[in-house]
Amino acid sequence: MLNVSKRDLNQRTSAVLAQATEVGEVIVTERGEPRWRVSSYRGQDDALARAERQGRYTPPSNQQEPWPDAVNGPLYTSDEVDAMLDDMKGAH
């Protein structure tokens, strides 16, 4: 994201708009504080594309993580698992 001052926007409007077209959006600052966002028009985005552009969504990676060989939790015997399941079911 590119930051420009309010004065730069006033003095070099066409250059700032060209930058907004190139990078997607430009933040306009006033006295060093971000105040406005200028973005290029992209037509009708779907909600997911709009959230990704705004930085609120990151698509999943194409590389899948392999399953771990061992889980870092406690190991239970078959009888312990049966006892826990019976305890969770309760007296129904």
Image (spheres, grey):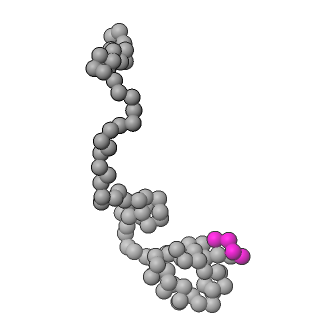
Q: Residue at x 32, y 52 (%)?
A: 65
Residue lying farthest right? 31
Residue 13 in which image quadrant: bottom right
Residue 70 in which image quadrant: top left
Residue 32: say if magenta: yes
The percent coordinates of residue 53 (x first, y second) are: 44, 66
Q: Residue at x 47, y 63 (%)?
A: 55
In depth, the one of 30 and 85 nearer the eye is: 85
The percent coordinates of residue 26 (x first, y second) are: 54, 76
Say which quadrant the C terminus sits in. Answer: top left
The percent coordinates of residue 18 (x first, y second) are: 48, 86
Looking at the image, can residue 59 be seen?
A: yes
Looking at the image, can residue 89 be seen?
A: no
The percent coordinates of residue 72 (x first, y second) are: 39, 36
The magenta segment = 31-35
In depth, the one of 64 and 55 nearer the eye is: 64
